[in-house]
Image: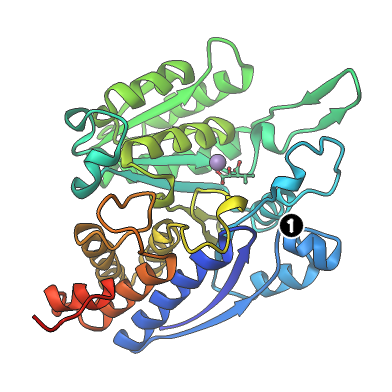
Amino acid sequence: MKLDIAVLAGDGIGPEVTAQAVKVLKAIAMEFNHVFNFKTALVGACAIDKTGTPLPEDTISICENADAILFGAIGHTKYNNDTLATVRPEQGLLGLRKTFDLHTNIRPVIAYDDLLHKSSLKVKQIKGTDILIYRELTSGIYFGDKTFSDDKATDICTYTRAEIERVAHKAFKAAQSRKGKLTLVDKANVLASSRLWRKVVLELATQYPDVALNCIYIDNAAMELIINPKQFDVILTENMFGDILSEEASVIVGSIGLLASASIGDKHVMFEPIHGAYTKAANKGIANPIASILSAAMLLDHFGLVEEAALLRAGVDKSLQLHITTPDLNTKYDHITTNKVGDFIEDFINNPNETNLNFTNIHLGQSTII
Ligand code: IPM
Ligand code: MN
């Protein structure tokens, strides 16, 4: 298969983690005789610094012409307390989502057996967690009208029936192919937009009699997700609730550096880790590339390259098993860098059967002569 992939590494740790995803995609292309062409483009704070805008025209046209976008991270701490900045890095990411109508964001939350002890939660609570969060990505409070003055600010949350239906259909279908459970998370006791979500989703449920639909409020969902995550199969929710719930869910898997996502539109697709730019960790080799690498696996799956995606994920599993992981997860070795994790998974793709002790030792920089 030939794929043109736009690589928007962005800010902070974005470039170093995205480099690992590109590395493993190149290994996959070699192994399976695919042609993946990568074109890099600017987005976010680095784009503002170079061009004055977080989403330059050049970047839009590179993405427009690509089969898929691989996104890194966005943001810079210098903007955190600058409440008056009207040009902000995040506009780059939001602009991409809106420009390419990437309305459905899919965030898998899977508790790896090898990492259960890394979670702040109890092992018996989280073992076996396997959730897919369907987050609406191009509407709601993120994109409504806004006003800002010294003593009053407004963010409008609007949803149309069509916006709810398109993401909801995808979530129902995902539930059908899994355990058949869908949980709508809203705040229908308070918000009018949530009441429309509930009305529309309850109506659609009649088309999916094989899916058990459950509707819960966001405050309750935030608690249930932590005390009993295994009760969830597919979660469907609006833009901001999905942002918050998915970051909360990272506590279950042990590190936010593990969570990948796919942002799907009718014509375009983007793959992005759910974590941010983590500016203070940039260029130290400590950023976890797994979220970015697993986003690349979602890219492969999207194009039907399921064997390829499975091999990539097997490489990730192996790296976790052998503790070839960055410091956020590693209690055994202290010198495994971002790059090293990428190298290990690349080598695994090239030689999936050779991950014996010597192979591990080579990656740990230890002698292989016993
Ligand atoms: C995410 C991020 C973004 C969001 C930010 C960077 C705008 O937190 O993808 O979860 O809020 O959607
Ligand atoms: Mn977020």
Residue 15 placement, left or right of 205: right
Helix or strand or loop: what does disc 1 sit on?
helix
Residue 157 placement, left or right of 180: right
- Residue 52 can be seen in this image: yes
- Residue 177 coordinates in the image, percent (x, y): 26, 47
Viewer-proximal residue, 7 or 190? 7
Label tally: 1
Q: What residue is shown with label 1?
A: 45
Classed neighbour count for the residue bearing mark 1: other residues with Cα under 10 Å, few (<14), some (14–19), many (≥20): many
Q: Amino acid at mark 1?
A: Ala
Q: Residue at x 87, y 37 (%)?
A: 84
Say if 252 sits above or below 285 in the image.
above
Q: Quadrant of residue 126?
A: top left
- Residue 119 coordinates in the image, percent (x, y): 30, 36
- Residue 356 can be seen in this image: no
Q: Quadrant of residue 365?
A: bottom left
Say if 103 sits above or below 6 in the image.
above
- Residue 64 coordinates in the image, percent (x, y): 66, 70
Task: State which image quarter holds ligand 1.
Answer: top right
Q: Quadrant of the C terminus?
A: bottom left
- Residue 66 coordinates in the image, percent (x, y): 59, 74
Q: Residue at x 28, y 29 (%)?
A: 121
Q: Residue at x 47, y 17 (%)?
A: 219
